[in-house]
Image: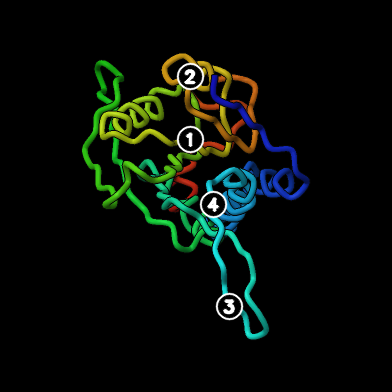
Amino acid sequence: MGKLVIFDHPLIHHKLSIIRNELTTPQDFRNAVSEIASLMTYDITKELPTKDVNIKTPVAIAKCKQLTKDVVIVPILRAGLGMVDGILSVIPQAKVGHIGLYRDEKTLEPHEYYCKLPDGVTNANVLLVDPMLATGGSVSYAIHLLKQLGIKKLCYVGLVGAPTGVERIQKDHPDVDIYLASLDEKLNENGYIVPGLGDCGDRLFGTK
C-alpha cells in the first residue's frame, strides 16, 4: 500500500488558515497555495535517488550527490497550476507536463481533453498535482492515464482532501503515495470538501 502523508507543520497550518479564509484575496490565495506546495516538496522529495559525484571546489575535490532521474510536475488543469511555481522554487530543473480533464454532465465520469508531457517522462519521478482531492475520480483517472503511458514512479500531491477521495485512490491505485496538507472531515451534498476552501480554481484565478 502506498503511503498516506498528512503534513503537520506550523508553517503549513498557518498558510492553510489563509487559503481557507473566504476573505483572502486572489493574490494572497495564490501566494499561500504556492508557498504550501513549496514547503511540502522538501519532504516529498527526500527519497529521490542520487548518485555520488566528485566536484572541484576552489579549494579541493568534494564528494557530492546529484539526482539521477528527472523530476516532472504534472498539474491537472486548471487548479493544479497554482502549485507548480511553488514546487519549481525547490526543484527549478524539474520539467512540467499538463493534463486537462472535464466531467461528463450525464455520467459524471472524467474525460481527457488535453495531455502534453515532456520527453523522457516514463523514466522520471512524476508528481501529479491537484489541490483538491474530493471524490478522487479525476485524480484516479489522471493516474490511470499516466500509467497507460508507461510511467512507473509517480505520487499524488494535493492540499486538502476528503476521506472519500483518499479511499478511492487507495482502492484504484494502491501503489501510489498520497501527500496532503490536510485531510478534512467529509464531502457535502454538492461534492465540496468540508470545511475545505471552496472552489480552488475560481479562488486562484478570481473567476468567482
Of all residues, the one furthest to the bottom in this rendering is: 58
Is 195 left, or right, of 151 in this rendering? right
**CA distance for labels 3 and 4:** 18 Å
**CA distance for labels 1 and 3:** 35 Å
**CA distance for labels 2 and 3:** 43 Å
Q: Which mark is residue 174?
A: 2
Pick whichever, 182 or 2, lies toward us. 2
The spot of residue 162 in percent (x, y) is: 57, 24
Query: Which residue was labeled with disc 4?
Result: 50
- Amino acid at pointer 2: Pro
Query: Which residue was labeled with disc 3?
Result: 56
Figure check: 183 above or below 201: above
**CA distance for labels 1 and 2:** 11 Å
Which tag, 3 or 4, sits closer to the chain's start?
Answer: 4
Q: Which mark is residue 155?
A: 1
The image quadrant of residue 138 is top left
Placement of the N terminus among the 4 image quadrants: top right
Figure check: 69 above or below 55: above
**CA distance for labels 2 and 4:** 25 Å
**CA distance for labels 4 and 1:** 18 Å
Q: Secondary structure at mark 4?
A: strand
Is disc 1 in contact with disc 3, using a CB cutoff of under 8 Å? no
Residue 190 in sight in this render: no
Residue visible at 73% across and 43% down in the picture: 13
The spot of residue 4 in percent (x, y) is: 60, 27
Q: Secondary structure at mark 3?
A: strand
Which tag, 4 or 1, sits closer to the chain's start?
Answer: 4
Which tag, 2 or 4, sits closer to the chain's start?
Answer: 4
